[in-house]
Every structure is written in C-alpha cells, then in structure tokens.
Amino acid sequence: MASCAYSYVSFLQMIDEYPLVLTRRQAQNIFKAGLTHLQTYSRLRSLSSEVVGAHANNRCLWQLAPKHHYMMHELDTVKRTRINCRHFTLLTGEGFMGVISRMARPCHRSNVSKRVLQRYKVKLALSLRRHFARRD
C-alpha cells in the first residue's frame, strides 16, 4: 500500500512541478511513477479479490475503475509527446475544472462547449509560445 500511495504522490508532485514541455527524462519519470502506481494498485486488487470470508480484512477493496485505464493512456501520451498532462487532462481534477469553469462562465449555453474549447486552445497555444520564447 505504501508503494502504491508513494508512487501516486510522486506522480502528482512531478506533474505539478514540471513545466508544460518536458524533457525526455521528466517524461520518463512521470511515466515510471504513474506505471508503478498502476501496477501496485493492480496487485493490491488481485490480493483483495482472493480474500474470502464476509468480515475478512482487505476483502473487496481496491476496485479497478475506468480512470485507471485512462491513466495508462495518459502516461503513454506524456511519454510520447513530452507534454505535461496537467495542462490537458482531468486526471488530477479540481484545478483543471476551475480553469474550465472560469472560461465557461461568460459563455452562452447554446455554444458553451464550442467557446470553451476555443478559449482553451488559445490558452494552451499561448502557454506553448511563452515556453518556447523563454528557451530562445
């Protein structure tokens, strides 16, 4: 359990601290921490499924959820593209939702989806432009 929790915390810290465009090493570190989390969680699920008895400890815990499958895809994307997933995913939740909700507030409900996507694409493009301008 400690390895599972530690690797997830490491993953979250890395995506918070690393920049938008990652080095190969940073992308590999994120991938490795995320994969370790998924593998240890899967092992805990396997052990839990073998427990018998109505009141036994660790019985029916560690359920696999669609977000685990999604996380694996995101880890592959980060490794391949070297773009920090913090900037384009709901994997870590509330911070990203805050950005999206602030973009959606002034939009009319008839076109909110389209306008939010347009605004987010502009925000992401400006972030990438700033990043590459600093590198020059």
Image (spheres, rainbow, N blue to C red):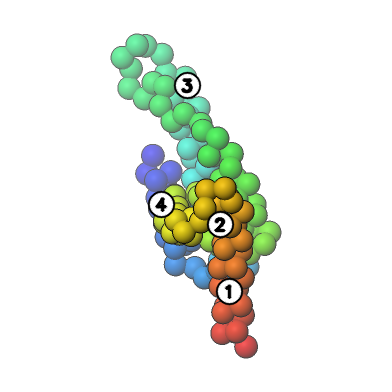
Q: Amino acid at mark 4?
A: Glu
Foreground tag (3 vs 1): 1
Element at label 1? helix
Callout 4 environment at 10 Å: few (<14), some (14 to 19), or many (20+)?
A: few
| Label 4: which secondary element | helix
Q: Residue at the spot x=43%, y=30% of the render?
A: 62
- Circle number at residue 49: 3
First in residue order: circle 1 vs circle 2: 2
The amino acid type found where label 2 is placed reads Val
Q: Nearer the viewer, residue 38 or 93?
A: 93
Q: Residue furthest bottom?
A: 136
Badge nearest the viewer, 3 or 4? 4
Q: Which mark is residue 116?
A: 2
Q: State if disc 3 and disc 2 touch (CB < 8 Å).
A: no
Measure the alpha-carbon separation of dots 3 and 4: 31 Å
**Circle nearer the N terminus (2, 3):** 3
Mark 1 lies on residue: 126
- Which residue is drawn at the image coordinates 52% and 53% (left, top)? 108
Q: Which mark is residue 94?
A: 4
Kind of residue at badge 1? Leu
Instruction: Give whichever of discs 3 and 4 has the lower sequence position.
Output: 3
Tell me the tag on residue 7: none
Mark 3 near mark 4, Cβ–Cβ under 8 Å? Answer: no
Whether residue 42 can be seen here: yes
